[in-house]
Amino acid sequence: MHKLLGLKTTQRQVIRTDYRKKRQALSSKEQSTAAHNLLRTCLTSTTLAQSKTIACYIANDGEIDPVAIIDYCWQQGKTVLLPVLHPFSKGHLLFVNYHRNSTTRTNVYGIKEPIVSTINLCVLANIELILTPLVAFDAVGNRLGMGGGFYDRTLAPIRRDSLQTQLIGLAHNCQQTHMLLTDSWDIPLHAIATPDQFFSVD
Ligand SMILES: Nc1nc2c(c(=O)[nH]1)N(C=O)[C@@H](CNc1ccc(C(=O)N[C@@H](CCC(=O)O)C(=O)O)cc1)CN2
Ligand SMILES: Nc1ncnc2c1ncn2[C@@H]1O[C@H](COP(=O)(O)OP(=O)(O)OP(=O)(O)O)[C@@H](O)[C@H]1O
């Protein structure tokens, strides 16, 4: 492997392990306080309030829980979507409508996802805002995920086709890193919301 590529891969793996441990170590009280404060932070930006079609996620592995954001969106009559592992296209995600009565299943990672059908699928170009899970972030919008490359692959058309879709990462305060080394395929975030702060990039 090329030296720099090897260094980056190692840095990513070390940070991934380290930052997954940090979020897993949070108590349920810390998790619920964080989840509550996260909605407040998100509402300090106009993006969430102005978007009508919003992709979110179901918390896993100590991730900050966006449940209050999902409830807020439903109350406001917004369309909420969840990522679903693509059934044929390995490493890609589909975004599927999620409402209070959605039928769900558990995927191979143990994460709940809605059942895909032709009527509940949403194409990327029609999603105004994607709230992404992440393992670590830096203040300039770089994101480190679980390592599957799912979001990077799925979101690549945003750069290729200059889509207007806004990307906001959701994270605990302890998931901020000084600086992440980036790769060519990384899709940077427009902002990051934590319980204490809203980081707008540029
Ligand atoms: N809540 C949530 N939903 C999500 C994601 C996510 O990161 N969080 N994804 C974001 O892509 C997709 C699923 N991708 C995932 C990829 C890997 C693992 C995982 O747990 N992998 C390994 C550990 C990886 C490692 O340490 O290298 C495992 O099985 O333990 C989970 C989800 C779509 N849905
Ligand atoms: N657009 C892409 N096309 C092809 N391969 C990609 C693309 N994006 C990422 N990958 C591959 O996915 C692998 C994992 O990428 P990376 O470590 O950036 O994932 P991640 O951002 O941590 O995960 P996720 O996006 O699932 O949360 C990389 O080794 C890379 O080869």
Image (cartoon, rainbow, N blue to C red):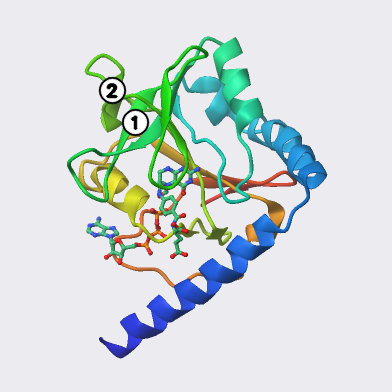
From the viewer's perspective, is 158 left or right of 52?
left
Residue type at numbered disc 2 = Leu
Q: Which residue corresponds to the image point at 60% horizontal and 11% vertical from the top-left?
A: 75
Q: Which residue corresponds to the image point at 49% horizontal and 36% vertical from the top-left?
A: 57
Residue type at numbered disc 1 = Phe
Looking at the image, is 30 positioned above or below residue 182? above
Assign a secondary structure to mark 1.
strand
Assign a secondary structure to mark 2.
strand
From the viewer's perspective, is 80 left or right of 178?
left
Q: Are marks 2 and 1 in contact (CB under 8 Å)?
A: yes
Q: Which residue is mark 2?
A: 121
- Numbered badge on residue 95: 1
Separation (CA) of disc 2 from disc 1: 6 Å
Question: Which quadrant of the figure contains the N terminus?
Answer: bottom left
Q: Is residue 126 visible?
A: yes
Label 1 crowd (10 A; few <14 / some 14-19 / many >=20): many
